[in-house]
Amino acid sequence: MHLNTHIPLWEGFPHVVRTQQFSRETLDGLFRIAGELVEERKKTADGPWKALGAGRTLLTLFYEPSSRTVMSFLRAATLLGMEAKNVPDPLVFSSEAKGESFDDAIRMYSGPYFESAFRIADVLVIRHPELDRIERAAAVSNVPVINAGNGSDQHPTQSLVDLYAIHYMFDELDGLHVGIVGDLERGRTCRSLAYLLGKVAKNIRLTFIAPPELQMRQDVCEYLQRHGVPYEQRSDYGDVLSTLDVLYIVRLQKERDPARVEALLPALQPLRFTAERLAEVPEHARVLHPMPIDASVPGLSEIAPELWDIARTQQDRRLAWFTQCDFGIPVRMALLAVMLTNRWERQ
Ligand code: NCD
């Protein structure tokens, strides 16, 4: 099998900063590659992808916690034959702890100063609490930079995974009614998702369900208006669940403002997803969550504990977040494969 990685490239290639960079044609190409990788890997551990990244290194720099994103990038890179390395807790263990600037750190990791054969990394994957760091990194880096989450702004590769999951589950992206519930104000996954659906899906309808203080921000709403995408903002479920194809749940982003947690948690309680709510969701629909599910106080979790085991054991196919998560590696492999095989020179 030959893996054809020549697809229409995204705007601003090779950096991945926000989901609006992606067109439907690019997504179709990425999803074709990811689908081929999924099929091929069922048959053999050593597929045609294995040599794509030989001699290249992927470096992850995470200034915020991560489980799935960092590990799926490292694994995706390894499966492509790359060397995969993580800088552990950069503010503690890298020279940034000694006062080195972020920009210098990026320049140093992405070299080269005299010879590209000696650069440390060929792809940088960065998660940072500050909104502007990914763009700054892309401006100074000599290698592709991927946004793995910039504060409460965007998390584009999660949306690629989410759309791949939706495409896999419904066999299409068009004509769906997608409800998004939770901390929409600061949830970067749902912001990226709304932007991407608004850009690439046809005849889509979005319903944002959140208390007024956590509603989707104006930038996303204006984008949807400009693209003629119908959306509704509401603070309760009403009878909307029975009309949905996808319900996308996000947790309260406690780390963004710990002082507000006590006030915001009660506001979200009426929106918790429980067995009673599930009963309203149509059989064909899917409930997604980028994870992690906040289980620190089970009685307050955005998904009630009575549903956790049902989802884990896949007893109800509507509760689909573990399947969604499974696509993290093939979709990121597809993205990296395109970066590794399409030429880019820094201007
Ligand atoms: C998300 C994130 O980091 O934004 N996690 C993830 O990468 N799947 C979601 C979240 O933390 O709520």
Image (cartoon, grey):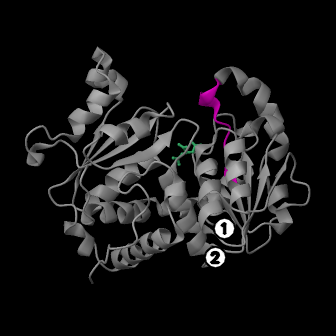
Q: Mark 1 is on which residue type?
A: Gln
For the point 40% across and 54% down, the residue is 12
- In the figure, 180 relative to 170: above or below? above
Quadrant containing ligand 1 reads: top right
Q: In front: 261, or 6? A: 6
What quarter of the picture does the N terminus occupy? Answer: bottom left
Q: Indicate the position of residue 252 as horizontal and vertical percent values.
A: 68, 37
Magenta segment: 248-257
Marked residue nearer the N-terminal end (2 or 1): 2
**Mark 1, residues whose alpha carbon is within 10 Å: few (<14), some, or many (≥20)?**
few
Q: In front: 266, or 137? A: 137
Tell me if residue 338 can be seen: yes
Q: Indicate the position of residue 140 as horizontal and vertical percent values.
A: 30, 37
Tell me if residue 47 can be seen: no
Residue placed farthest to the top in the image? Answer: 98
Residue placed farthest to the front in the image? Answer: 347
- In the figure, 139 relative to 156: above or below? above
- The CA distance from mark 2 to mark 1 is 19 Å
For the point 64% across and 31% down, the residue is 254
Which corner quadrant of the image does residue 82 belong to? bottom left
**Mark 2, residues whose alpha carbon is within 10 Å: few (<14), some, or many (≥20)?**
some
Q: Is residue 33 left or right of residue 155?
A: left
The secondary structure type at the circle numbered 1 is: loop
Q: Is residue 208 left or right of residue 84?
A: right
In this figure, which residue is indicated by the disc labeled 1? 315
Q: Mark 2 is on which residue type?
A: Phe
In this figure, which residue is indicated by the disc labeled 2? 170
- In the figure, 13 relative to 101: above or below? below
Disc 1 beta carbon < 8 A from ligand 1? Answer: no
Q: Which mark is residue 163?
A: none
The secondary structure type at the circle numbered 2 is: helix
Q: Indicate the position of residue 84 as horizontal and vertical percent values.
A: 26, 49
